[in-house]
Image (tube, grey):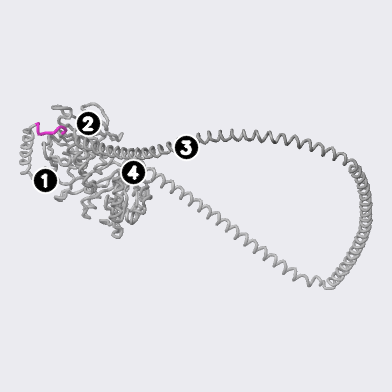
Amino acid sequence: WLCCVRLRVRGRVHGDRGSVEAARCAMRSGSDAAQANDDQAKRRKLADTFDPDDFAPGAIYRLTMHNFMTYSHAELSPPGPRLNCIVGPNGTGKSSVVNALAIVLGGSLRLTERGDRASDAIKHGCDKGYVEIELRDGNGPGQNLIIRADLDLETNHTKYSIDGKKTTKTEVKDRVKKLGIMIDNMLQFLPQDKVIEFTKLNPKELLASTMKAVMPDEHTEHEELIQLAARVGEADKVRKGKEKKLNGLREDVEKLELDVQRHAEYERNVEKRNNLEGKSAWIKVLSKNAEVKDTSAKLKEAKKELAREEAARDAARAPLEAAKGAKRRANDAHNKAIDAARDAERKAIALRAEIETKHQETVDALDAERTKLEKALDDQQSRVRTAKQQLERARAELERVPDDAELGPQRDAATKKIKEHSDERARLEGDFDAARTAKRLAESKHDSAMRQLEQLQDSEKAKAFALERRHPDSFKVRQWVAQNAQSFEGEVVGPIGLLIDVVDEDHGRYVEKAVSDGIFGGFIVFNPHDRDVLTSAIRANKWGANVYAVDASASQPAQHAFDARARELGELGVCGWLDEGISASPVVKGLLCKLSGVNNILVGTAALDGKMDALEKQLAARRQARWSVYTPEKTFTSSQSRYGERKQATTTAVVRRDQKPWLLGH
């Protein structure tokens, strides 16, 4: 119901010629106007004859737009129960109606690539605006649902109300979802930039979107059945695993039962062995007792025989002991004599060594004294010879000394040479000071360059941080690309916002206004394979990022309609084209020119604001019917209808200079 609607205007539409009725009137001559009014009356009469049962709950009954985009005030009602169409030339406000439906039903302008803020939807020159929609039987049979979205330029926010009561955007989405309205379903709402993505849906995704759009309850039940089937499959896998484990445990139990039987048999055998060992030990004890008795009798007889032999031995030991004592006394006397001889020999050896040591010390002392005297004599003779030589040299020099007349030129030459050396030293010191000054200057330039490099790096980090806040999914894609670089045949470039630099804050605002925000978070690839790989990954992870396939070999410098730096344009305040203030690679700049037309937007000074009439004449002389001009304070846009030479529309917007451009890291 949202892809194509036929709406008719009730009452007078105020504002510029961007409304549907104004477009129709512009397409007809004076004679056709009456016929158009008759056709409009017939359609209104036909709409009043529709059977209420033909309308599904949630069908549009009325749409009202106030200070919205190109409309001052317009009310469209009621559409038919079947197919409805909005027709008209470009620039007549068809997209504004679609944008109004997207916003009031809980969507965002970002879906239509016409902006992403409330201020982008408010008519120029107005502070506030609203969109109100009435849905049939939205509150039950015979009770329509009224949803209103109020836009505020000052706060740049959108506030919602249902049946006159304030509510949240989430509640609006829930209410319209219950009526089968889904803004995020491409089968119900398909913006132009989503057509390529829609054509790439596989049959399963297309079937799911179709069921969600036409049979939401059945789709929910279908999803629950799929999840239930998945859980049943998982449970069946768990059951089979447990059965396998149970069978294994049963086999283990059977093996353990055999082990238990073997262990019981082993215990019985051990018990029998212990019984037999006990009986054997008792038999051995009885036999040992008899042996002990026989052994005791033999031991007593042996002790008696030993006593007799010891008595005989003691009788024979007395003479032997006397002889042993005499031998010990003789050995002691011999040992004492040997010790006395050894002491005498040691004393003699020590005395001889002492005498020899003292004799050697005396000889060494005499030799040292002699050597000392000889050295002193040699030193004295050497000093005498040196003194004689010095005396001879002094006499020879005295004889060679010239008079004062001969010494004058030599003294002057020496003085001149000393002065030359002094001058050379001063020159070298000057060169050294100059080199030291140049070194300090070079170090200062190096430090300044390093500070500028650090500032540039800080600015790049700040820009990346600002872009990541606006497009967090794009940085997830960037990380995925880095981790899966082997999956690509060529280079993947992006996010595009990091590859763009501007010359100043004004150009940053111009570029952010001219280029769609979705492009900044997009990526560039150079062959169909890489495009399909990256698009599949983005869709699988449900990331919000665009992919642009570019032929790098076909990239050419931006083409301009005329020379914007001509003298007569410069006198009015025109500075050049917008793309001339953008620093980027040829591929990136070419993509911006193709998607956003930055090579067809003029840039001027604030003085140009009051000279638009003169500028229009200059542009008309250059056959430019469609043009845009950006200045620090305002932006101007003009176009011409495709169906005639008549000028279609001219709009002016005020630039908000209180907001710093994020492209410069703000």
Of the two numbered discs 1 and 3 in the rendering, the one whose residue sits closer to the viewer: 3
- Does the residue at mark 4 contact the one at mark 1 (Cβ under 8 Å)? no
Residue 242, given in percent of the width and then of the height, sits at 33, 38
Residue 45, given in percent of the width and then of the height, sits at 6, 34
- In the rendered view of the protein, which quadrant contains the C terminus? top left
Q: Which residue position is annotated with label 2? A: 175
Q: Earlier in the sequence, mark 4 or mark 1?
A: 1
As shown in the figure, which amino acid type bears the numbered disc 3? Answer: Tyr
Q: Is residue 666 left or right of residue 291?
A: left
Magenta segment boundaries in residue numbering: 52-58
Measure the alpha-carbon separation of dots 4 and 3. Answer: 72 Å
Circle 4 SS class: helix
Q: Earlier in the sequence, mark 4 or mark 2?
A: 2
Q: Nearer the viewer, residue 111 or 284?
A: 284
- Does the residue at mark 4 contact the one at mark 3 (Cβ under 8 Å)? no
Residue 53 belongs to the span the image colors magenta: yes
Q: Is residue 26 visible in the rendered structure shown here?
A: yes
Of the two numbered discs 2 and 1 in the rendering, the one whose residue sits closer to the viewer: 2
Q: Nearer the viewer, residue 149 or 598?
A: 149
In the rendered image of this protein, does residue 223 appear above or below residue 397?
Answer: above
Of the two numbered discs 4 and 1 in the rendering, the one whose residue sits closer to the viewer: 4
* Mark 3 residue crowding within 10 angstroms, few (<14) / some (14–19) / many (20+): few
Measure the alpha-carbon separation of dots 1 and 3. Answer: 112 Å
* Mark 4 residue crowding within 10 angstroms, few (<14) / some (14–19) / many (20+): some
Q: Which mark is residue 27?
A: 1
Quadrant of the image occupied by residue 528: bottom left
Q: Is residue 93 left or right of residue 42?
A: right
Q: Nearer the viewer, residue 199 or 146?
A: 199
Q: Which residue position is annotated with label 3? A: 266
Q: Earlier in the sequence, mark 1 or mark 3?
A: 1
Of the two numbered discs 2 and 3 in the rendering, the one whose residue sits closer to the viewer: 3
Q: Earlier in the sequence, mark 2 or mark 1?
A: 1
